[in-house]
Amino acid sequence: MSKRESIIEKGDNIFKTENNQERQRLLLQQNLLYDFDMQIYSKYLDKNKPLNILDLGCNDGNTSLRRFANYSIKQYVGLDIIEQKQTDKKNISLYQVDLEDDNLDQFIEKIMRDKNIDGFDVINALALFAHIKNPSVMLSKIKRFCKKDALIFVRNIDDGFNICYGSKMVEKGLKFLDKTKFTGFRYSGRQIPKILYSAGITNVKLEKTGISTLELDKIERNALFHTIFDFIKNSLDKENSLKIISVQNERRKEWLKHNFEKLEKDFMRDDFFLHFGFMFYVGRL
Ligand SMILES: C[S@@+](CC[C@H](N)C(=O)[O-])C[C@H]1O[C@@H](n2cnc3c(N)ncnc32)[C@H](O)[C@@H]1O
């Protein structure tokens, strides 16, 4: 996909709770990126300061709640378009909402009243912006609910930072990321400074440009393989099940199915190298 689109316009959401395949893959990605993310959270957050956290595109909340587990959570509010189950913890609430909805600000205002939240200290948006059509509009609405000096954490993908060497086959497979309808806009990482700037957030640092196979042990390297190639496979399967798959993607689906084991073998070789473009920015309001 070469341009930014909203997942709703594509008619379905690959991230729905009942989609077990995608749920398992997200879990793998969450675990793989735990240390990667924590290096940044620990640099910016104070363990003793109670935090009001607004988590955008929280899915079931697990990724973020694991990352904030060692911090003092005053209130955690998770928002996602998928259906949500409430937790029994008073300081953790999850809501179903479309972040691109015109009435998003009213929705958040009501939550803040209900939960007695005077302002957010942290806005968290992990792997979200690739799926949102107009993230700066969403952020402009949200910004006014933040405290002075609030932090915004944004992790997003940019395939421009993908550097692959040592397997022509993996190189070919990686190009499919850009071709499916459910893998999001794959070049959104580079747009984050402008998106934040348009929303009035000008104090922004780029903390990471990606993860490389060199820093991973065998288990993590295998998780990275599945994070990437299961995502392509799940997305092509979703297109197929919705009967919106193109002839080219039908071919890609077959190629992937036929070569999946070979791809994994190449990926796991010691002399194979990949730098994969997970970008992490931190902004201060
Ligand atoms: C790749 S997942 C990331 C989930 C979680 N932040 C993580 O890192 O594990 C993207 C999430 O954004 C949600 N999402 C996409 N578009 C959305 C929208 N318009 N409004 C609310 N949530 C949305 C999806 O439902 C999905 O849960």
Image (cartoon, rainbow, N blue to C red):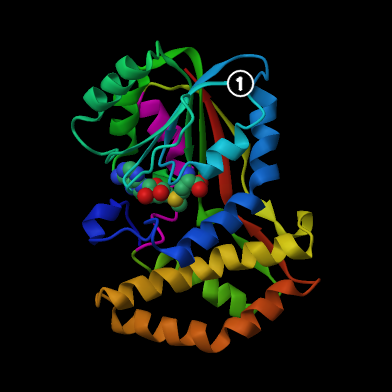
Residue 163 occupies quadrant: bottom right
**Residue 157's spot in the image, x, y percent?**
51, 50
Q: Nearer the viewer, residue 31 or 91?
A: 91
Quadrant for the N terminus in the image: bottom left
Q: Residue at point 43% right, 46% down? A: 59
Q: Residues within 10 Å of mark 1 (few under 14, many from 20)?
A: some
Q: Which region is colored magenta?
A: 182-199
Q: Is residue 94 left or right of residue 220?
A: left
Q: Position of residue 74 (x, y in %)?
A: 52, 18
Q: What residue lies at 37% left-to-right and 61% top-to-bottom?
A: 14
| Lateral position of residue 186 relative to residue 259, left or right | left
Q: Between residue 62 and residue 125, name the one nearer to us.
A: 62
Decide if ligand 1 comes within 8 Å of the CB at mark 1. no
* Residue position marked by numbered label 1 in the rendering: 72
How far from the left and from the top, in percent, is residue 100? 25, 39
Q: Quarter-wise, where is residue 235 in the image? A: bottom left
Provide residue 143's location: percent of width, then percent of height: 36, 21
Q: Quadrant of residue 50?
A: top right
Query: In the image, is residue 190 part of the stretch drawn in magenta?
Result: yes
- Please report the residue visible at 76 percent of the width from the left and 57 percent of the height from the top: 216
Residue 271 located left or right of residue 140: right
> How many labels sit on residues?
1
Is 169 part of what is drawn in magenta? no
Query: Disc 1 on helix, strand or loop?
Result: loop
Q: Amino acid at mark 1?
A: Ser
Q: Is residue 143 above or below residue 167?
A: above
In this rendering, the answer to whether 197 lies above or below 239 is above
Query: In the image, is residue 114 above or below residue 85?
Result: above
